[in-house]
Amino acid sequence: MLILVVYVDDIIFGRNEEAMSQSFALVMQKEFEMSLLGELTYFLGLQIQQNEGGIFLSQTKYLKQILKKYGMEDSKPVCTPMVTGCSLSANDESASVHQPTYRSMIGSLLYLTVTRPDIMHAVGIVGRFQANPKETHLQAVKIIFKYLQETQNYGLWYPRDTDLTLHAYTDADWVGSVDDRKSTSGGAFFMGSILASWFSKKQSSIALSTTEAEYVAAASCCTQLL
């Protein structure tokens, strides 16, 4: 088996036979002007560390860059990405902030969720206010950066020896949005001990009870499982 990933002019490939990898590289080098850089260690902001136990994916280098970009590299760290019971609103009466900067910060955080599912929910909430961000919203974004300052070396670990049993976990907050009273569904999907996929998304309808909110989340989760 040969798995090939192409992004513009960057190519990564993996195989289960060494000979196949070498023959593929020779064919590509004959057809195109390209160089073989060896074992994968860095790709599109992702850092890849491989050893006998498995593969570790992280974005530590990228994280340090955005912390410096937004002046948060020396910020006081916090232990959670969002204050418990945080209820942000589009009708917040605090002062407006610079929209391009706010949107840039959200975009940087969204790319970081590729390897950081622990900030997925918090980033999804602050991302709802990009049209007219307020000072309160910006403070919530800065809390996420402070949490990242404390957890720079976090990432995803994919062990080599694991079963492929499928597990899923899901939950929902009830009427978490104070503006439209909609709930947010969340889920995580594992192949054995490997985290394969995750999501945090506002529900499309208003749930009249916690049971209904969790049923909607479970239904979405089962759909993805199937």
Image (spheres, helix red, strand yellow):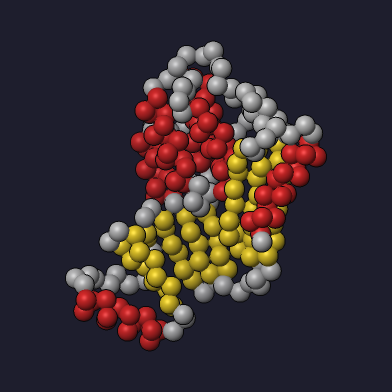
Marks counted in the figure total: 0
Residue nearer the viewer, 188 or 56:
188
Residue 141 drawn above or below residue 135: below
Q: Is residue 87 visible?
A: no
Find residue 202 and report its image quarter. Answer: top right
Percent of width and height locating residue 117: 57, 48
Q: In this image, 133 relative to 119: left or right?
A: left
Task: Pick out the residue farthest to the front.
Answer: 205
Residue nearer the viewer, 102 or 27:
27
Percent of width and height locating residue 123: 53, 37
Residue 60 drawn above or below residue 87: below
Percent of width and height locating residue 222: 70, 55
Q: In this image, 44 relative to 132: left or right?
A: left
Percent of width and height locating residue 150: 53, 41
Residue nearer the viewer, 30 or 62:
30
Q: Residue at x 50, y 62 (%)?
A: 56
Task: Pick out the residue farthest to the left.
Answer: 33
Location of the C terminus by quadrant is bottom right
Q: Residue at x 74, y 34 (%)?
A: 207
Q: Residue at x 50, y 66 (%)?
A: 55
Q: In this image, 26 relative to 62: left or right?
A: left
